[in-house]
Image (cartoon, helix red, strand yellow):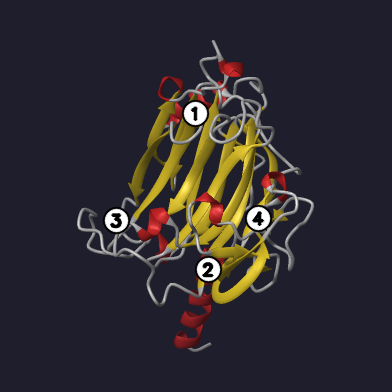
Amino acid sequence: MQPRILGIMVLAALTQSACAKADAPAKSGGWEMVWSDEFDGTELDRTKWKPEISCWGGGNDERQCYTDRPKNIKVADGVLHLMARKERFTGPDRPPEIAESPNPKRTQSFTSGKIRTLGLASWKYGKIEFRAKPPKGQGTWPAVWMMPSGNTYGGWPLSGEIDILEGVNLGAACPTCEGNVGENRMISALHFGDFAPANKFVDTRVALASKMLPSDDFHIWTLEWGEGVMRFYLDGRFYWEVKADKWDSASPLAKSNDVAPFDQPFYIMANLAIGGRLSENNNDKGMAATVTPAEFLIDWVRIYQCSEDLQKGLACMQKAKRDE
């Protein structure tokens, strides 16, 4: 065999190995996997996810209609594709759980995809982990986040909101960002408190250790959530801890409960928003003419719970902290 041919074969084998999806561990640091989607098929698994169909803009003046169409939601090549496109579209204003009756129609200038486990799966405490590649561009706003499945303490934000990943305007102008690549920080946040305008939040921004754009490649985000504490990681690097003394709920049902509202089951969702106040009011402002088409790619989502401490989840978090 010619050396050049051998070299090509070796390179191809190494490339294939590097691109192969890692097997999901049944246990990780004391956490036991209880739910996952590897997106290995050719269609969205409807036993695990429900697409949201709405045009209301998420309460943030976003500019998309979420649809349940292959041009906005696709599973292919082992990856979930949430795809935003510029097209005029008319659909229902709100999703069923918060819709008026009758639900009015609304028209938007973009379409995109959003999937949720609402009504199918939710968890109280655990390790939530996913591998994803967010898009870049002024006006893009991909997110993976969690909302309460039962609204035990009342409507938003009394029952809380957990934002694990929010990517806003990646690559756009950012004078305060390190790395000379533009906006390279991802946002994590918790929302809680009282009804607007008395709602509250805490948040943080994190860049990759390399300071490169997160949109250049896939990365792994992790939330470890136990009673009274949440810990966030990016590619295994710890970057944020929030304890219960930083959050609260104004609900009378949360009185004398120091860990409310984040002590109830939450479901997970992923979406790619276009526009909205957070993106359009920052960086280069507004929306770039080339903001679409855009894709938010998710390789896998895995949920673990602490089998030795299902009630609080803290035993596994303590193990992780010792291992850092």
Q: Amino acid at mark 1?
A: Asp
Residue 306, given in percent of the width and then of the height, sits at: 63, 28
Q: Secondary structure at mark 1?
A: loop
Q: Earlier in the sequence, mark 3 or mark 4?
A: 4
Q: For marks 3 and 2, give the CA distance.
A: 22 Å
Q: Earlier in the sequence, mark 3 or mark 2?
A: 3
214 shown above or below 27: below
Numbered disc in front, either 2 or 1:
1
Mark 2 and mark 1: Cα distance apart in space: 34 Å
Q: Dot 2: within a 10 Å radius of its alpha carbon, few (fewer than 14), some, or many (20 or more) residues?
A: many
Estimate the spatial distance between the alpha carbons at disc 1 and disc 4, rounded to whole Å: 27 Å
Give, as a three-letter code, the residue at label 2: Glu
- The residue positioned 65% from the left and 53% from the top of the image is 94
Instruction: Give whichever of 301, 12 is nearer the camera.
Output: 301
Left-right relation of 217 to 78 = left
Q: Are marks 2 and 4 in contact (CB under 8 Å)?
A: no
Q: Is residue 133 above or below residue 306?
A: below
Q: Are marks 3 and 1 in contact (CB under 8 Å)?
A: no
Is residue 24 rendered to the left or right of residue 227? right
* Distance Cα–Cα, label 3 vs label 1: 36 Å
Instruction: Tell me the amino acid under the disc marked 4.
Output: Ile
Q: What x and y, as percent, mark residue 302?
A: 63, 46
Q: Which quadrant of the figure has residue 321?
A: top left
Which residue has dot 1 on it? 194
Residue 141, percent across and down? Answer: 46, 58
Which residue corresponds to mark 3? 211
| Residue for badge 2 | 295
Q: Nearer the viewer, mark 3 or mark 1?
A: 1
Q: Residue at left 42%, top 19%?
A: 245
In this rendering, the label closer to the viewer, 1 or 4? 1
* Label of residue 135 in the image: none
